[in-house]
Every structure is written in C-alpha cells, then in structure tokens.
C-alpha cells in the first residue's frame, strides 16, 4: 500500500480505501453480505494496508456502522485506522427532523453513529449532502462544537455544489471554526464534471479530495458491454441486477467509447479494466484517496493491484481522450488558448 496526505491535515491515508456500504443485510441482492464475509473483508483490507474506512448512518439502515465497529473491535484495529461516517439523509420516515444538516440533526446523528460504531470519536464526519435549507453557518458552528467536545476530529463535505464548499471554507476561516478537511465526490472516467470547479478548489485550499464511485458502480469493471441502440447493458453483476449506475448514463457515446478503450488497453497491458480505471483516478495528484466499494474480499484483492500500476503517458492520454467531455461555460474562458488574450502567452499563473 502507498499512503498520501489527507489534504492539509496531518493524517496519512491509504491511497485506496474501503467504502463499506455493503456491510449489512438490509439492502437486498448485490448490496449486502454475511457477517463472516464482512469480517473477512475488513481483515483482508487491514492486512493489505488499508487504514481508512468510510460508512454512513443510512448504509444498510445502520448495520454498516455496527458491523464495521464490531469488526474493528474484534481485530483490535481501532487505533490504527481512520473511520468516517456521514449524516444528512432521513433515517426515520416518520420524523422529518431525522434528515438534513441542522444542528439538532447533526448532534443526534453523531451520538447514534458513535453508539453503533462503538467508538468514542469519529475521525471524519461528512455532510452527506446539503439539504438546500440549513445555512452553512449553522452546520459549521455545530461541527465546531462537536470537535471541541472531542466527538468529531474533522468535518468533511460530500456531494455539495462548488459554491457551497467555497462558502463553507471562507466562513470557517472567518469565524475561527475548523475548516472542512475533505470533499468526497463522485469521480471516475465517466464522471469528470468536477474537474473544472473542484480540482482548482482543492489545489487552492488544500482540502482533500476523496473519490467515491471510481468504477461507476461496476460499469468500468470490464464485466459489462453496452448496446446504446437497444439501450441494453449486458453482463453479470450489480449493474444488470439493479440497473443502477449512479450519476452515469450508460448509453451516451462517451460511455461506450470508454468501455471499448478500457477493453483494448486491458488486452495490450495485461491489466484488468478495473485496475486501469482505478489507476487513472490515482494518477490525479489532487486525489488523496479512492474509496473502493466491493462485495467480496476477492474483489478487493483484485482492485488493490491498481496501487502497483503507474500508467504510461500514452495510456493516460488514451483514457483522457476517450473520456473527454466538452468544456462548458464559464470554463471555456479559462483554456490556455483563450488565456493568451489575458497573459499574452500560453503559460498561465499558478492557480494556488
């Protein structure tokens, strides 16, 4: 395993980490596993050097947190790992205040998560998503109180707009509250929209970027083929069982192009499409860690081989070209070519 700095914090995290949404028994086929399999998965991750585990209070209706905490306790591993969890989604359909980003919801969810995890503190607490109502000031002030109380070490933001992340960072600095330490966002060969807004943001602020969904729910694993004309995805796995690909429309030309290119490069290099797709994300210097979502210890071991890969420049270029999407306004004003009208040359100032 290789380790990277978690943004501007003093923490070091494994470059590949484990998202444990599948720990539990309540989400149905392809999203659950048995208790022994879960323990084996956590043990394999620890043996392979993973030191960061990510969960949420809604994953498998809370069982993910409970099973993760119990496994870490049985393996006496708590002191050598970082645990993150999230809040924001409603946990009780009868209680409208069981979701959102208010002070009350955050405080209650942290207490319940600590109980399920069996921990005295959460290393990194994420706002799972902004509720579009609660002011950032309220959420940040509540997080500051939880940090002061020793129940949370760092605050993170997940799935938020760029303007919200920027506002939260500035407000925290202005008020002397802990700044958001990490952004957890969907980032892979088929989801590159964040590059215009968020990559410059993390470079400028030192905020960690944590990539979730690096294989687009398995679509980039090499197990699937796409027929855009018939609008069919074929292959054996989670995608064809649940037909869930997250933020990805599998029937766009770019999706077909990326899957074809991964298959060609896999044949040329001897590395699996999944390993190539993961190595592409790892090649981004802005990324602190990549969260793997797996259904077995064997799948984890296969994906972890991506750590050993250093993609040749021509392979990176081929994947960049296959996954490239048109630049949209206002980022059309920030191409090197157009910036010559500002700076008089193709070299632009350092964004930091």
Image (cartoon, helix red, strand yellow):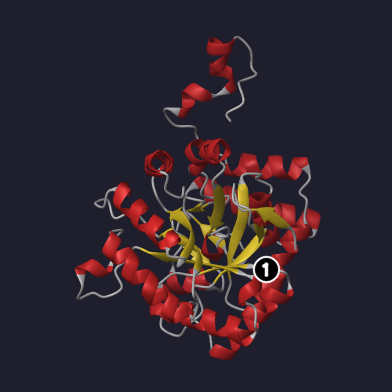
Q: Quadrant of the C terminus?
A: top right
* Residue that numbered label 1 is attached to: 50
Foreground of the two, 275 or 138: 138
**Front position in the image: 105 or 42:** 105
Q: Position of residue 306 (x, y in %)?
A: 72, 60
Q: Nearer the viewer, residue 66 or 59?
A: 66
Residue 269 against residue 196 in the figure, above or below: below
Question: Which quadrant of the view contains residue 315?
Answer: top right
> Which of the 4 image quadrants contains residue 243?
bottom left
Would you say residue 27 is visible in this rendering? no
Whether residue 344 is situated above or below residue 278 in the rendered picture: above
Q: Could you tell whether 318 is left or right of 105 in the image?
A: right
Indicate the position of residue 257 as horizontal and vertical percent values: 59, 48
Instruction: Label 1, secondary structure: give it.
Output: loop
The residue at the point 63 percent across, 73 percent down is: 79
Residue lying at 44% horizontally and 81% vertically, measured from the top left:
116
Which residue sits at x=42%, y=28%?
329
Residue 168 can be seen, yes or no: yes
Q: Locate residue 346: give its quadrant.
A: top right
Residue placed most toward the observer, 293 or 161: 161
């Amino acid at each position: 395993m290789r380790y990277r700095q978690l943004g501007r914090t003093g923490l070091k995290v494994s470059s590949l980490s484990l998202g444990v949404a599948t720990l539990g028994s309540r989400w149905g086929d392809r999203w659950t596993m048995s208790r022994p399999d879960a323990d084996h998965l956590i043990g394999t991750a620890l043996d392979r050097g993973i030191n960061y585990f990510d969960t949420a209070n809604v994953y498998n209706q809370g069982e993910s947190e409970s099973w993760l905490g119990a496994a870490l306790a049985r393996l006496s591993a708590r002191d050598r790992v970082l645990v993150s969890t999230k809040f924001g989604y409603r946990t009780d359909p009868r209680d409208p205040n069981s979701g959102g980003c208010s002070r009350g919801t955050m405080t209650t969810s942290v207490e319940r998560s600590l109980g399920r995890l069996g921990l005295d503190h959460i290393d990194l607490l994420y706002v799972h998503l902004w509720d579009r109502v609660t002011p950032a000031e309220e959420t940040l002030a509540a997080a500051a109180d939880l940090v002061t109380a020793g129940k949370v070490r760092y605050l993170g933001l997940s799935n938020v707009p760029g303007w919200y992340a920027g506002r939260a960072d500035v407000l925290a600095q202005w008020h002397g509250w802990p700044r958001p330490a990490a952004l957890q966002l969907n980032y892979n060969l088929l989801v590159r929209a964040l590059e215009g807004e968020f990559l410059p943001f993390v470079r400028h602020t030192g905020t960690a970027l944590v990539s979730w969904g690096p294989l687009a729910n398995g679509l980039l694993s090499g197990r699937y083929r796409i027929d855009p004309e018939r609008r069919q995805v074929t292959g054996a796995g989670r995608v064809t069982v649940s037909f869930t690909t997250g933020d990805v429309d599998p029937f766009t030309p770019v999706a077909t192009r990326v899957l074809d290119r991964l298959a060609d490069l896999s044949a040329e290099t001897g590395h699996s499409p999944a390993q190539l797709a993961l190595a592409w994300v790892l090649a981004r210097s802005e990324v602190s860690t990549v969260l793997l979502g797996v259904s077995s210890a064997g799948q984890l071991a296969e994906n972890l081989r991506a750590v050993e890969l250093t993609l040749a420049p021509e392979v990176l270029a081929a994947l960049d070209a296959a996954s490239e999407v048109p630049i949209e306004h206002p980022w059309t004003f920030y191409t090197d070519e157009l910036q010559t009208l500002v700076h008089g040359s193709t070299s632009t100032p350092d964004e930091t």
